[in-house]
Amino acid sequence: MVVTRRTPVVPAPPVSRTPSSQGQPRSARAPVIQDPSVVPRVSSPLASRDAHTAAIITGASNNFKEYNDKDEHKKIKKDKPKKSGKKKKRKSTIQSLLDFLTKLLVLSVTIYVFAVCPHEAHLQSPICRGLSEYKRVVLDPYVIPPIQAALAHPSIAPYVDRVTEVASPIILRTQAEWTRRIVPQWEKRVVPVWINRVVPAFTTRVVPQWQKYVVPQYDKHIAPRLSKLEPYVARAESYVEQAEVMYTTRIAQHVRTATHNLQRWQQKTQPYILLAIQKSQDTYYTAKPHVVPLAKRIVAEVQYALLFLREQRRIFVDPHVAKLWEKVKELSRGSPATSSSTFAPSDATDFSSPEPAISETLELESTYAPIIPTSADQPPVETVPPPGKATETSVGTPSIEDAMTTAGAEVTTVFDLTSQPASASSSHFLSNSVLPSVQPSQSASSVLSESALATSSITSAVADSSSLSATSVAPTAPSSVPAHISDNDEIDIGAFYAELGLDEHLTTSQSHEQAPLNPPESEEERTERLRLKAEETARKRADIEARHSKWEIELRSQMETGLSTLKGRLEAIRSVAAAELAEAPDIRDAIESLVADAEKYIKGAEIYLRNLKGESRKNDEKMPLWERVVEKVGVKFSERLGVVEAVVSTWYNAILDQELREVYAVAAEVREVAEKAQVDLGLDYAWLDEVTYSDWQRYHSLIDASEKFAQEASSIQNGTYENMITDNPIIPIFEDLELEVQDVVIGFETRLRRIKRDGERAFNSVQKDEEKGTATDPDRDVSPEVSILPIPEDGTGERGYVPPVVIGRSKEEVLEALGRAESLEGSPEYNAREDADAGEIVSSLVREAEDERSESTAIPHTEL
């Protein structure tokens, strides 16, 4: 007995745990089976155990070696792209050269900046000037203040102070060493090389090449294009200048006035607005608990009312609207609602027996006669009986459609019989002998002849049997008479169509068909026609020209009347305005306030100058502060002068609006006359046969004349009309006010200039050049004239003399005013009060100047 031994299972060899081998199947038998060298040479399981085990171990070792080879191969593949990528990222020679040149240029510019810019006082170099502007525009306002604010924060400032204490000695020592050792070497070795070699080499080599290659290309390609843009740039600049001039002359004063008024109104109304907001808020919070439930209840009641109204509308309104809508749809389709005749109740009771006979006959006829639909454009025609008759009788006549378009076509006829019986005998006659059955095979001629005989017999029978009845024929009849009806038929066709009511239509159509064409026009007739036409045109032209002349005369008279009316109204407005301006309290108070404020500003400046002289500050600090205070005083006086100008402009604008309203009213009356004339003549000119260009020019000259009159009226108002010069009594009064304000301005500027020079002499010893310049050019410090006059003048810039301070006042008034001033100045109360006011005003200006100085010194200027 042979026992089969099982082959022991050898565990799989350990493999790599890298991600490259984790996802692959780990089969140890596949390589052993596929590799012939690994297969054991034992043919049966009875072979030796050692040989079989050796074969398995050999296969496992080979498998482990293969896995290791795969891992190494993958690592090599991963390393190759990295090396190739590094090789690809290697810079080219040109890029390396450009990087080197860029670094060299940056280094050169840095050396130049640190070497040249600190010593340039006027920043003549473009690089230094550009860096200085960059510092002034970007760094000083946007970069340095946030950094300084962050460093000045309470949580950071202690650390900054500590670092400053530690670093300051180091920085000072480093700066001293830099100044003592490095700067002399820099000045000795680098600067001479730069000046003696670099700059000459640049001038001799780079600049000629630039002039040789770059400048010609610029002149050839870029300069012509820029020269083409110069006209547009000049035009744009002219437009900008015109806009600025227009804004300065027309809009600026209104903007200043509006700004002043808005600020004043805002100051006045702000307390009331705040009070109203507070009261409204309190009222809202008080009423909210009561208003919200009430609003919800109102909304619910409104919804209930709407539902009730909707229900009532459905009950009472919608049925009537539906009926009306049905009627509208029936009328829009064009078909009546009823399709059969209606019998009267009395007739139905008296003549009830013949109805079955007629209905039976109609039914028989409908069974024998083929049904052909009739066209919708032939409605039945109903005749209204005369009022004297008691009963009605409707006798049906055949409605025949003749389709004779081709030879041999059969004709079918449908009889629409709508009859009302008149008597028993007539009904019996209709049912027995009148209505024949029409066979489909009958021809058109036989049908027509038989229907005509039946109709004549019906008419005679009804006339004999019923003397109280009237025949009413209401069928549809053909619109044309067949040409093949024989003359042997004893029928009066004219009477037949007259009874049908078609004689007028046939007569009209025949007359239209038989109307002859227009005969050719002879030469005499043509000449006569043209002569009549020319006479008619001449008559129309004469009428139009007469009316046109009449309108022109009326327009001219209206223009003359308007000019005289406008002149009278302007004189009335200006006389009243002149009387008001002579005693205008607002303007007078504004001027007096200007004088008082100017005096306060001057005295305040004098007081501050005395105080500043007594302070222990250095002259370098006193001089900038004094200049700022003087500048503030001048600005404040200019603002007060602007207030006076705004008051005068506001008053004059009201008068100007009244004058412009009168001008517009007179111009509107003249334009109304011109428009009426054009309305009267426009269509006649349009329909005139021989209208010319001069006629239309004369027509349009009506509106042109009205527009010209509007311009003349405007020129009369502003005083530029040559033919009619009107005196404006407001202008002399304004000129007096102007002179008075100019005196105040000149006196203020003179005194302020003297005080300013006193301060400059006290705080700055170097004033010789300025004094020399002042002595040689006395008009240099003269400021431009300030005008409050709202009326532009032509010769404002050509005044040959400066008016005295007290112009327009008599000698007695001047002496009296000087005496009052001396008496007031001598009183201690007046002097104390004036000094207090002046000191308070200038102290506020000094505070503003010191604040500005502190703000400007908070950011120290550092040279690059």
Image: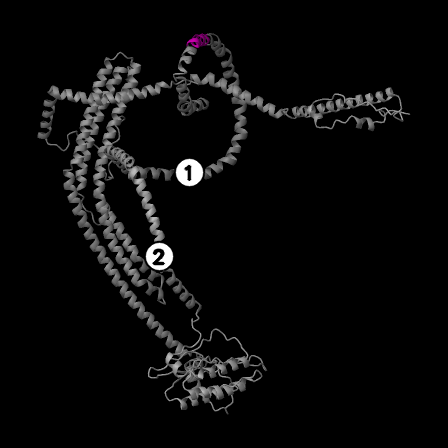
Classify residue 353 by image quadrant. Answer: bottom left
Judged left or right of residue 597, residue 486 is right
Classed neighbour count for the residue bearing mark 1: other residues with Cα under 10 Å, few (<14), some (14–19), many (≥20): few
Closest to the observer, 326 or 137: 326
Closest to the observer, 3 or 716: 3
| Residue bearing mark 2 | 312
Closest to the observer, 129 or 257: 257
Main SS category, magenta section: helix
Q: Residue furthest right?
A: 1
Residue 749 lies, with reference to residue 193, above or below; the image says below
Classed neighbour count for the residue bearing mark 2: other residues with Cα under 10 Å, few (<14), some (14–19), many (≥20): few
Query: Residue at coordinates 11% horizontally, 23% vertically from top-left?
Result: 824
Q: Which residues are magenta?
A: 165-176
Quick one: SS at disc 2?
A: helix
Residue 159 lies, with reference to residue 340, above or below; the image says above
Percent position of residue 114, x then y: 47, 17
Q: Marks 2 and 1, Cα distance to the nearest angstrom? A: 76 Å
Judged left or right of residue 704, residue 599 is left
Identity of the amino acid at label 2?
Gln
* Residue 769 makes an appearance in the image: no
The disc, 2 or 1, on the residue closer to the chain's N-terminal end is 1
Identity of the amino acid at label 1?
Val
| Residue bearing mark 1 | 233
Quick one: SS at disc 1?
A: helix
* Residue 101 makes an appearance in the image: yes
